[in-house]
Amino acid sequence: MAYLFLAISIVSELVGTSMLKASQGFTRLLPVLGMIVSFTCAFFFLSLSLKTIPLNAAYAIWSGIGAIATVVISVLIWKERINTGSIIGIALIVVGVVILNLFGPGHGGETADSSRSEQLIAQKK
C-alpha cells in the first residue's frame, strides 16, 4: 500500500508542476488552485508512504521519477526543447539524488542521533 501512496504522490507532484507552468506566473486562477490541490495531495500521500518506506528510498524514487517524468511532460505537453546538455544534466541530477539517498548520512550503520548519544555518554564518564 505504501508504494501505491508513493505513486499517487508522484503523479500529484507531476500534475502540480504542470499546473505551475499553466498558471503563467500565478496569473491564472484555475491552474493555481489545481497546483495547490495537487501539491497538497503530493505531500499528504508522500507522508503516508513514509510510514513504511524509509525516507531515503522514498525520496530517491519520488525525486528521480519526478525529474524524468517532468522532462517528458515538458517536451510532450509544453513543447519545450531539450538538448544533449540538458539530458546529461538531468541524468546527473538523478544519479546525484540516488547516490545521496543510498550512501548519504545515516547509511554508515551509525546515525547522527546514536553518535550524539555516544558523545554524551563519553562526556559523563
Image (cartoon, rainbow, N blue to C red):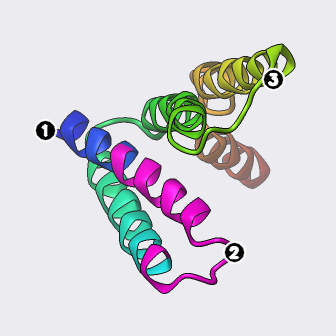
> Dot 2, crowdedness within 10 Å: few (<14), some or many (≥20)?
few
The magenta segment is 11-31
Q: Where does label 1 land, which residue? A: 1
Q: Nearer the viewer, mark 2 or mark 1?
A: 2
Residue type pointed to by label 3: Gly
Is residue 104 rendered to the left or right of residue 55? right
Is residue 102 rendered to the left or right of residue 4? right
Question: Residue 39 is drawn in which quadrant?
Answer: bottom left
Q: Secondary structure at mark 1?
A: loop
Q: Nearer the viewer, residue 73 or 41?
A: 73
The residue sitting at the left extreme is: 1
Residue type pointed to by label 1: Met
Q: Secondary structure at mark 2?
A: loop
Picture layout, residue 51 above or below residue 28? above
Q: Where does label 2 land, which residue? A: 25
Give the x, y percent position of residue 23.
Answer: 57, 72
Q: Where does label 3 land, which residue? A: 89
The tag earlier along the polypeptide, 3 or 1, is 1
Picture layout, residue 117 above or below residue 63? below
Give the x, y percent position of residue 10.
Answer: 39, 43
